Amino acid sequence: MSLMVYNTLKREKELFEPLHAGHVGMYVCGVTVYDYSHIGHARVMIVFDLIYRWLMKSGYDVDYVRNFTDVDDKIIARAAERGVAIDLLTNEMIAAFHSDADALGCLRPTHEPRATDHMDAMVAMIQTLVEKGKAYVADSGDVLYAVREFPRYGQLSGKKIDELESGSRVDVDTSKRDPLDFVLWKMAKADEPAWSSPWGLGRPGWHIECSAMSCGHLGKSFDIHGGGMDLKFPHHENEIAQAQAANGGDFAHYWLHNGFVNINAEKMSKSLGNFFTIREVTERYEPEVLRMFMLTAHYRSPLDFSDTALDESKAALDRLYETLKRVHQLAETSAALPQALTDIAACALPTDFCAALNDDFNTPEALAILFDCSRALNKGLNEGGDVEVLLGQFRAMTALLGIVQQHADTWFQRGDVDTQFIEGMIKERLLAREQRDFSRADAIRKELSEQGIVLEDSSTGTTWKKL
RNA sequence: GGCAGGGUGGCUCAGUGGCUACGGCGGAGGACUGCAAAUCCUUUAUUCGCGAGUUCGAUUCUCGCCCCUGCCUCCA
């Protein structure tokens, strides 16, 4: 089966063919670590985590690199504001990022470089650009990239230099040869962190960081470069210009961009105040709900965030967990544990599920297949048929998507609950039912229900869950 | 203004040149149950923004129009 991916550079889906057989190099732009990550970041983490998982499942040896931008104006400002050292702030935010990503079920990339650990590579790349006449030292002392010296500038975004300049909102900086020229090396101001370079003390511009880190880990040419839609221009455009001009290689072959998380159909942003951090959301919803929510839409589509949408994702997930719960019940009563419960690696994915993911990572379609499987499984469980194959598929699909990874009881019985009290009430109700004292039984159920506890009677006994 | 991507049932979200337009949420009816819950079954868009064209046939291709979002400044 072959993987088709939408390549922003070509503006069409194309067959994915890695540079080196059996191996994939993937670089994804990470975050600037000056604050907690928001749900927009969560989308990038989850989207590329899924892509990472699918590439590995497809048999590729994947080098997945995601950076941390740990030197930047915002970081400097935030550290000053808080009166703490920059390291302290960035280390704290990186730790927070990891705990968020882990909670969302994202696997750690193979490499997570920090910009400050790659200064030499950045300086070297800038030096090459200066030597090749693609960059120059401006009157301000900053080193700038000369966009006019790179004829293919605009290949990714489809923008033309002249069109960009007419109606441009860029403030004209007189030290620039062209208003679009961007900073490669910024001269240090007093009290700012600085590194030495042939042009004096300073620090790198944002764009060169990613070019240096990606090429440093993956080579001059590699397979996939990803990031959020808004990074297409100017960030990725500039990365291409730098890397191609400096290395002469073709840089990344496939450019993948995920759509935005919107609030009320508008882009989430701090200026609009419609901004949620991952931890704010996961305080109110299980992290898996957020992950599920991200998978319900195709990765390139915009995704409207709301409590209603989250509630729907929660409901959808509950449905899947109901199936799992029944499987657990089956396992408890049957002599031999189904292999699918003990050995997920041995479980095969359905062909149409694979086809969905091979079609530009179509997770909504993949989920539809999962739900079909869930229904078939429920039915098989109802009718007492052989469900081994279906169960294996169910487990394999949920494992790949990174959802339904908890025990059903953990999922349904979480939160503030007095288990002993509930179990006691259930026993009392059972007794009442045996004596056909249904009004007493119903009173017990009502009392529990008022505490958000729902009872479910089945042939194997009564179970409960918390709403 | 330039560039990019959209408009599919009450909501959400897939998809295809032609068989009954995927799935989830919600609604209705039924089976099961002492009654529920959960589950299963049935049902819920003569129709895919509007108009025209291509075609034997278009929601799917082409053109025009209307509307929405993003990028063009830091941004996932």
Image (tube, coloured by chain):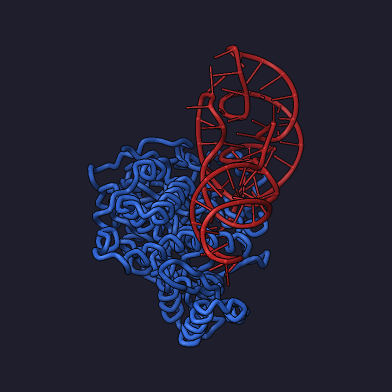
Chain colours: A blue, B red
- Can residue A185 be seen here? The reply is no
**Residue situated in front as seen by the camera: A34 or B5:** B5
Question: For the point 50% across and 41% down, which residue is it?
Answer: A154
Q: Position of residue A406 (x, y in %)?
A: 39, 68
Q: Position of residue A263 (x, y in %)?
A: 64, 59
- Asked whether A355 or A237 is in front, the reply is A355
Quadrant location of the N terminus of chain A?
top left
Q: Residue at x 38, y 65 (%)?
A: A405
Q: Is residue B14 above or below residue B24?
A: above
Residue at 34% x, 41% y: name it: A351
Residue A403 visible in rendering: yes
Depth check: A234 or A322 in front? A322
As drawn, is A346 to the left or to the right of A157? left
Q: Position of residue A238 (x, y in %)?
A: 46, 50
Name the side, left or right, on which A137 lies relative to A442: left
> In the visual, does A461 lie left or right of A222?
right
**Count of numbered marks:** 0
Residue A180, position in %: x, y?
55, 49
Which is more toward the observer, A48 or A406? A406
**The C terminus of chain A lies in quadrant:** bottom right
